[in-house]
Image: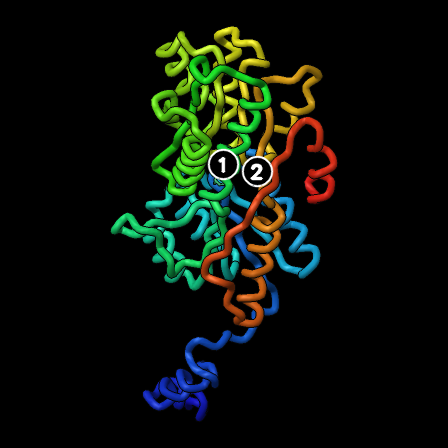
Amino acid sequence: MKSALARLLTSGLGLVLLVACSKPASGPSAAPSAPAKITIGFLVKQPEEPWFQLEWKFADQARQELGFEVMKIGVPDGDKVLSAIDNLAANGAQGFVICTPDTKLGPAIVKLAAERHLRLIAVDDRFLGSDGRPMTEVHYLGISARKIGESVGAALSAEMQARHWPAEETAVCAVTFEELDTAKERTDGAIAALTAAGFRAAAIYRAPQKTSDIPGALDAAAILLTQHPEVKHWLICGMNDNAVLGAVRATEGRAFPAANVIGIGINGTDCIAEFEKAAPTGFFASVLLSAKQHGHDTAAMLFNWIRTGQEPPLDTRTVGVIINRANFQQTLREQGVR
Ligand code: FCA
C-alpha cells in the first residue's frame, strides 16, 4: 500500500504543493537557496594569450578568498563553447564567466545557459543579438574601449612630436579587427585622437587582421608596408598588444630601425617580454588594463550572485594606465600582475 506522502506526491495536489513550496517566498527574482558547494566556469577564447592566463590567475585568487571551485576552460570556437557549457552542467556548476570566441554566439550561449540553469557574465567581448546589436540584458564587464583607444592615439601623437618626426614622412598603421566591437572602438578611438591632434587623415592606414593574434597582425601590416615604401616613420596601434607586436615584427622584417617606429599596445600583459629585451624595439608603450577586475571581480560577482542572489551590475567598464620600458616593472607590481 502506498504511503500518504507517496499518494500525495503522485496526485495533482501533491504537484501543486511541491511547486508552491519550491517557489521562493519573496517572488520569482529572489535567490534560490544557496547550494552547499559553488562551482563556476571561466571560459576564455584565447587561453594562450597572457591576458587570459592572468584573468584565470585572478579568478583563482577570488576562489581562494571566497571558497568555491573554478573550472578554467579554453573555448577557441563555438563547438568548444557549447560542449564546455554542457560539461559545466554535468559537473554541477551553477554559472560561468565567458569571453566568447565569437560575439554572434551570444543568443545560443544565453539559451543553452538558461536550459542548463547556469548564470552567466560576459567578460571582455560583449554578446551581439541576432539583430547585430549588443545584448544589453546580459551582464557584462569590459573595458572603456573608445577612451582607451583615444589615450593610445594621444600618446602616439605626443611621442611623434617629442621625436620631431616630419609629418610628410610619417604614417599610421592601425591594425584593425572590426568584426569585434571592442576592437573597432579601440582603433577608431586611436584614429580619432590622432586626427584631433592634427595628424593628416590621408596618411592613416587601416590594416585588417584576419586572425586576432601576432601572425594575423604581422601579415596585415606586411601588406601595408609593401604598399607604402615612401613612409619613413610609422606610428602603430591595434586592438591589443599582439596586434601591435605583429606590426612591429613586420617593420623589423623590412629593416626599419626601432627608432623609426612607435607602437603602442593595449593589455599591458602581453608585452612584458618585449619590454625586457635589452635593446628597445619599436614597441614603445602599452595601456595596462586591469586583469584583476576582469578575472577576480567577475568571478566574485558571479559567486555572490549564486550564493546570495545579489545581481551584478549589467554593465561595468574598466580603465587602464600607460606603461613603458621605464615604469612597467613598478606598475605591474602595484597591480599584482608580477
Ligand atoms: C579582447 C582582446 C583581449 C583583451 C580583452 C580585454 O578580448 O582580445 O586581448 O584586450 O579584450
- Residue at point 43% right, 22% down? 173
**Which residue lies under the disc numbered 1?**
46
- Residue at point 56% right, 49% down? 294
Is there CB contact under 8 Å for labels 2 and 1? yes
Quadrant showing the N terminus: bottom left
**Is the distance from the Cβ of mark 1 to the nearest ligand 1 atom less than 8 Å?**
yes
Question: Toward the viewer: 284 or 209?
Answer: 284
* Left or right: 66, with 213 as reference point: right
Secondary structure beneath label 1: loop
**Is the distance from the Cβ of mark 2 to the nearest ligand 1 atom less than 8 Å?**
yes
State which quadrant residue 286 falls in. top right
Q: Is residue 211 visible?
A: yes
Rendering coords of residue 93 (x, y %): 52, 59
- Residue at point 67% right, 60% down? 67
Checking the image for residue 51, the label placed there is 2
Q: Amino acid at mark 1?
A: Gln
Quadrant showing the C terminus: top right
**Residue closest to the far bottom:** 4
Q: Is residue 13 above or below residue 198?
A: below
Checking the image for residue 14, the label placed there is none
Q: CA distance from mark 2 to mark 1?
A: 9 Å
Coloring applied to the structure? rainbow
Rendering coords of residue 333 (x, y %): 73, 40
State the count of labels. Answer: 2
Rendering coords of residue 215 (x, y %): 46, 21
Rendering coords of residue 170 (x, y %): 46, 16
